[in-house]
Image (cartoon, rainbow, N blue to C red):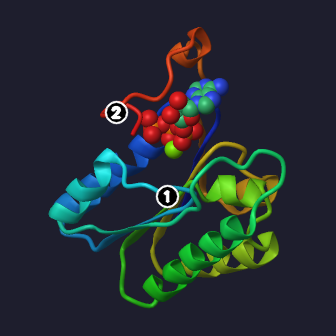
Amino acid sequence: MLQVYTGNGKGKTTAAFGLAMRAKGRGKKVGIVQFAKPEESGEFKIARDIGIDIFHFGYPGFIIKSPREGDYTEAMKAWEKFIEMSKDGYDLIILDELNIVLYYNLLDLNNVIETLMRLKNDFEIVVTGRYAKDDLIKISDLVTEMCPLKHYFDIGVGAREGIEF
Ligand code: ATP
Ligand code: MG
């Protein structure tokens, strides 16, 4: 199946990692490709430690107006890693923040859609990130929208180590 966790509320990436743990606990082969994440997050090392194959890609800094060359090359590298992994017998592959990459048009949407439609027959795929594209929602089997009834970001509390990253 193809699952999408999107919306502006907190819990998309962490839900995906929870699922990864669950699958791993059942002896499944689990892979994670993180897009738009130039740095290791708290969950990165621990995922490795429990035998999940995890890779992160991303160009440092924020996309202010238009994407930089590095944003495109990192997105492409991450996608190629996923394509390589797709031939390796995984039961579950998580594409963390792929939605963001598609939102900024860093990858060809039609190619991504076509590829995910084909590969979801072979293994479970989870895509996370805000602003999921309608075309992706259309071909997905499960879409959860995290809805922020309240978020401390709105009163100025930024990302905290161990809680948000
Ligand atoms: P988690 O990793 O905790 O599950 P998530 O994957 O649902 O969260 P993302 O959209 O990937 O959340 O990233 C949230 C990050 O963006 C947080 O670190 C937060 O500080 C930051 N952020 C920026 N703008 C906002 C906003 N308007 N509301 C909430 N968070 C925001
Ligand atoms: Mg996230």
Q: Does the residue labelled 1 lie within 8 Å of ligand 1?
A: no
Is the Cβ of the residue at disc 2 closer than 8 Å to that at disc 1?
no
Q: In this view, does 82 lie to the left or right of 132?
A: left
Q: Which of marks 2 and 1 is nearer the N terminus?
A: 1
Quarter of the rendering containing residue 68: bottom right
Amino acid under disc 1: Pro
Q: Does the residue labelled 2 lie within 8 Å of ligand 1?
A: no
Q: Is mark 1 on a helix, strand or loop?
A: loop
Q: Which mark is residue 20?
A: none
Of 74 and 151, nearer the camera is 74
The residue indicated by pointer 2 is: 161
> From what the image shows, is residue 127 above or below residue 53?
above
Of 39 and 75, nearer the camera is 39
- Residue 79 location (% of width, % of height): 59, 76
Q: What element carries label 2?
A: loop
Q: Which residue is found at the position 43% from the left and 69% from the top?
A: 93
Quarter of the rendering containing residue 105: bottom right
Quarter of the rendering containing residue 56: bottom left
> From what the image shows, is residue 159 above or below residue 6?
above
- Residue 164 location (% of width, % of height): 41, 34
Q: Which residue is found at the position 72% from the left and 54% from the top?
A: 137
Q: Is residue 26 left or right of residue 114?
A: left
Which quarter holds ligand 1? top right
In 3D space, how far apart are the residues under numbered discs 2 and 1 (Cα atoms)? 15 Å
Category of crowding for the residue at label 1, using alpha-carbon neighbours closer than 10 angstroms: few (below 14), some (14–19), many (at least 20)? some
Q: Can residue 147 be seen in this view?
A: no
Q: Residue 38 carries which label?
A: 1
> From what the image shows, is residue 163 above or below residue 123?
above
Amino acid under disc 2: Glu
Q: Is residue 67 visible?
A: yes
